[in-house]
Each structure stands twice: as structure tokens, then as C-alpha cells.
Amino acid sequence: MNESTSVTPVTISGTGSYVPEKILTNTDLEKIVDTSDEWIFSRTGIKERRIAAEGEFTSHMATKAAERALEQAGITAKEVDLIIVATITPDTLTPSTACYVQANLGASSAVAFDISAACSGFLYAMKLAKRLISDGAYQNALIIGAEKLSSFINWKDRNTCVLFGDGAGAAVLRKSEPGEGRILASETGSDGRHAGLLDIKGGGSACPITMANATDNLATLAMQGREVFKLAVTAMRQASEKVIERAGLTPDDITLVVPHQANLRIIDAISDRLAIPNEKVFVNLHKYGNTSAAAIAIALDEAHREGKFKRGDNIIMVAFGAGLTWAAAAIEW
Ligand code: ACO
């Protein structure tokens, strides 16, 4: 059933994003590991990524993105009653990054918590916030995808260090008024059997960092890229098809697809399989690399500010990440 007809409709009333100033290019990486601009660009589509400054944390980037989203939505932080931060690189294991963001914003009326679903996290947060608003529990939700992946990268591992970057994106959700757009359908999924394909093994309760293992790079991201690639294409295609169908749309009705920004070859494979032409697919990964939970949030904000869609247009967002997790959403803007 189309979600818009079954429950109180929810709309996105503002978006915002922030990326750190420092740019790390592929050519810079050639000086750090045995790689080349040609290899990175041809395999991934990435040219450069942003790296947070010393002392700039996930919560700082999240706060800046949130401020921009609130400004666009035309509400103050005091009016926000729900903050969900999707991240796999929290400032601290506890408290949540969302609580730091709440304090930074002065959003004193909000309940704040994090969710961990890697690159799918922003769309998980969207689905959750939508449901909580529909149920009447909250009125103005701030959902944020924010990552400081540079703190969890093994800068000696060329398999991973060339892929990731830092940044944050945010959106404000509220009840849709007549004549406004709405979230039409959403889909989330997980398959923990593949947890070992993409993980950060150390730093949690299973493997605390100790004097004995401190030099083993356990608190950095490890990935079996080729296996993840194959699963990503299938899961993202299926999730997209589900939301397109549930929203009562056909590929021709879609103005823009905003996919997770991990690899241009994955993005091309999905647009191929969905029969949606490349020019209807938003790509900014050449500038930022893979920013995990922040990627779709940043891309949505950039596409919005660049005027890539307008009221009434249909947008598909689709993501895939560690867990494994996947998610998609269909939105009428
Ligand atoms: N520079 C040069 N050579 C490299 C580099 C590099 N940076 N990295 C790997 N190589 C080498 C490998 O060692 C390998 O060499 P070998 O054949 O001698 O062993 C060769 O290049 C090919 O490696 P592959 O892993 O087969 O390369 P592939 O074409 O699969 O591309 C990549 C790798 C880019 C990681 C791709 O598999 C991919 O994008 N996977 C999906 C990642 C993804 O979508 N993640 C999403 C979630 S991220 C999250 O949740 C946080």
C-alpha cells in the first residue's frame, strides 16, 4: 500500500549539509600508499575527498549541517522535538552524537539518539522519524547523517583509504500540509550473515583496544570490496524497485535518483537495471568519496540547492552499507 494513503503524510521541509575545508586528492594519496589517480578514478569515480580538521568531530559537522537545514525549514532549534543522528563514527561510544548536537543547537525540547546502520543510516532515520511523526509522537524531526571516517581509516591500506571521506547532511521532517510533497514509500533491510564483509573490529566490547593490540589497526575499517560490490547492486536494485512500485510510480515518473555515493560503477549498474538514464542520477562522489551515512544526506541537499528538482517531482533515494544494510525511499517533493 502507498504509505501516503495509509498514515498521516510527512514531508521534508528543509535540507542542509557541511563538508570540511581540507581536500585530499587522489594525487595526494599517491604519496601515502601505492596507488594512482588513474586506478582510483577508473575503479570508483572518486577524485578527491574532504578530511575533518584536528579537533573537528562528527558532532561539529552534524551541527553545521543541521543549522542549514533548520534555516531552510524556517524553524528554530527550540521547535525541534526529535534528533536522530545516523553515524558509524560517533564522537564517543556514549553519550550519543545526537546529544552533543542537541546541546550545540540548544534544542532543549528534543529527544536525541543515534542509530548505526552505516551507509543506509540516513534512510533508516528517515523511515523511523516519518513513522514517529505520523503516529503523533513528534512534530519536527531533525535527521542527520554525519561521519568522520578519517579517524577510522588505516592510512596504510590502499584497499580502503582511497574510498572514504568526512562530512554531514541533514533534513527536517514534519507533517505534510495539503498541497505539499510527502514521503511516498520507504524500504529498509538488513542481513547480518554478511557482517564480516565490512567492519571495524576493534574498539567495541568484543575487542577493546589495549596496549597489546594498539598497533594492529583494529579500530579501522576493513572491507572485502568485491563481495560488497555484488551484494550492493542486487540489494539497491531490489529496494529501489520496491519503493517505486509501492509509491505507484514507473521509472518514467522519476525526476531524480539520489543513490549512495560509494562507487560510480555501482551507481551506473543500478541506473542500468532500473532503466533510469544516467542524467537522472545525482552524483557527487568525485568530490567527497564515500561519506557513509552522510552521503545521501549531502547529495540530497546539493541536488536541492542546485535546483535539480522542484515541488511535485518524484525522487528515489537508495543506499547500501555495512551490516549488511540497505534502504530506499520514494519522495514526492
Ligand atoms: N590502488 C591500486 N591498486 C589497488 C588499490 C588502490 N587504491 N586498491 C586495491 N588495489 C588492487 C588490489 O590489490 C587488487 O590487486 P591484485 O589483483 O593484484 O590482488 C586489484 O587492485 C583489484 O582489486 P579489487 O578489489 O578486485 O578491485 P575492484 O575492481 O573490486 O574495486 C572497490 C575495489 C573499489 C573497493 C570495489 O570493490 C567497491 O567499490 N566495492 C564496494 C564498496 C561499497 O560499496 N561499500 C559500500 C558500503 S561502505 C560502508 O558501509 C561504510
Image (cartoon, grey):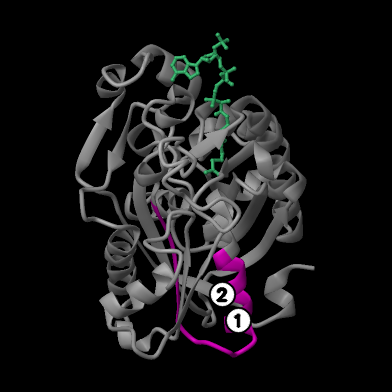
Displayed quadrant of residue 46:
top left
Residue 99 is situated, as x and y percent measured from the top left of the image, at 39, 76
In the displayed structure image, the side of residue 237 where residue 176 appears, left or right: left
Whole-Å distance between the Cαs marked 1 and 2? 5 Å
* Residue 129 numbered mark, or none: 2
- Amino acid carrying mark 1 in the image: Leu
State the residue in front, 57 or 49.
57
The answer to the question of whether label 1 and label 2 lie on touching residues, with beta carbons closer than 8 A, is yes
Residue 325 is situated, as x and y percent measured from the top left of the image, at 66, 50
Q: In which quarter of the image is the N terminus?
A: bottom right
- Mark 1 within 8 Å of ligand 1, using the beta carbon: no
Q: In this view, does 27 lie above or below 256?
A: above
Count neighbours of disc 2 (C-alpha within 10 A) and say few if under 14, some if 14 to 19, many if 20 or more: many
Q: Is residue 51 magenta?
A: no
**What residue span does the magenta drawing correspond to?**
125-147
* Residue 132 numbered mark, or none: 1
Q: In this view, does 200 lie above or below 111?
A: above
State the residue in front, 277 or 235.
235
In the displayed structure image, the side of residue 45 where residue 132 appears, left or right: right
